[in-house]
Amino acid sequence: MRKIINRNKIRLSLNKRLAALLAFSMLSLSACAETILQGDVKRGEVLSKVCAMCHGVNGISNVPIYPNLAGQKEQYLVLQLKAFRSGERVNMAMTSHAQKLTDQDIADLSAYYAKLNSQAK
């Protein structure tokens, strides 16, 4: 009888530990999760006028050293702009422009360029 009681105590103890670990994991993940902002394509189009000088009016650059932005994946663009803004990625032109952008600006620009046709000229 004593063995059964000890087993039950051990199981209860393990269940409490697992529940605590699960709760801690869930809290940790939610704390680390970055909020993904919904981009406004129309606002992104307005903001893109500055970008058009190098990346082209329709996101297709006429200058070989500047990348095309039209049709790029939205979250890729978000990550790259945030990397320029933070200094993780450095480019003389892009860093200075990106440092002026808010998270919402980045979401809007990324949504806009992701919607553009990458085949248009």
Image (cartoon, rainbow, N blue to C red):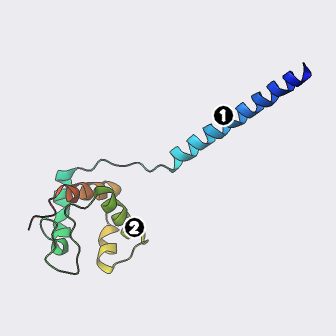
In the image, 26 versus 1, the foreground residue is: 1
The alpha-carbon separation of the residues under discs 1 and 2 comes to 37 Å
- On-image quarter of the N terminus: top right
Relative horizontal placement of residue 52, taking residue 5 as reference (left or right)? left
Q: In the image, what residue occupies the spot 23% across and 50% down?
A: 40
- On-image quarter of the C terminus: bottom left
Relative horizontal placement of residue 17, taking residue 71 as reference (left or right)? right
- Mark 1 / mark 2, whichever is N-terminal: 1
Relative horizontal placement of residue 17, taking residue 50 as reference (left or right)? right
Q: Is residue 55 above or below residue 37?
A: below
Q: Is residue 91 above or below residue 48?
A: below
Q: In the image, what residue occupies the spot 29% across and 77% down?
A: 93
On the image, which quarter does residue 101 sit in? bottom left
Number of marks drawn: 2
Q: In this view, does 108 lie above or below 12?
A: below
- Please, what secondary structure does the residue beneath circle 1 have? helix
Q: Is residue 48 above or below residue 39?
A: below
In the image, 119 versus 57, the foreground residue is: 119
Residue 51 x, y percent position in the rendering: 20, 69
Residue 10 x, y percent position in the rendering: 80, 31
Q: How crowded is mark 1: few (under 14 residues within 10 Å), some or many (20 or more)?
A: few
In the image, 101 versus 113, the foreground residue is: 113
Q: In the image, what residue occupies the spot 30% across and 74% down?
A: 94
- Please, what secondary structure does the residue beneath circle 2 have? helix
On the image, which quarter does residue 22 sit in? top right
Q: In the image, what residue occupies the spot 37% across and 49% down?
A: 36
**What's the amino acid at mark 1?**
Ala
The residue identified by callout 2 is 83
On the image, which quarter does residue 73 sit in? bottom left
The residue identified by callout 1 is 19
Relative horizontal placement of residue 51, taking residue 2 as reference (left or right)? left
Disc assigned to residue 106: none
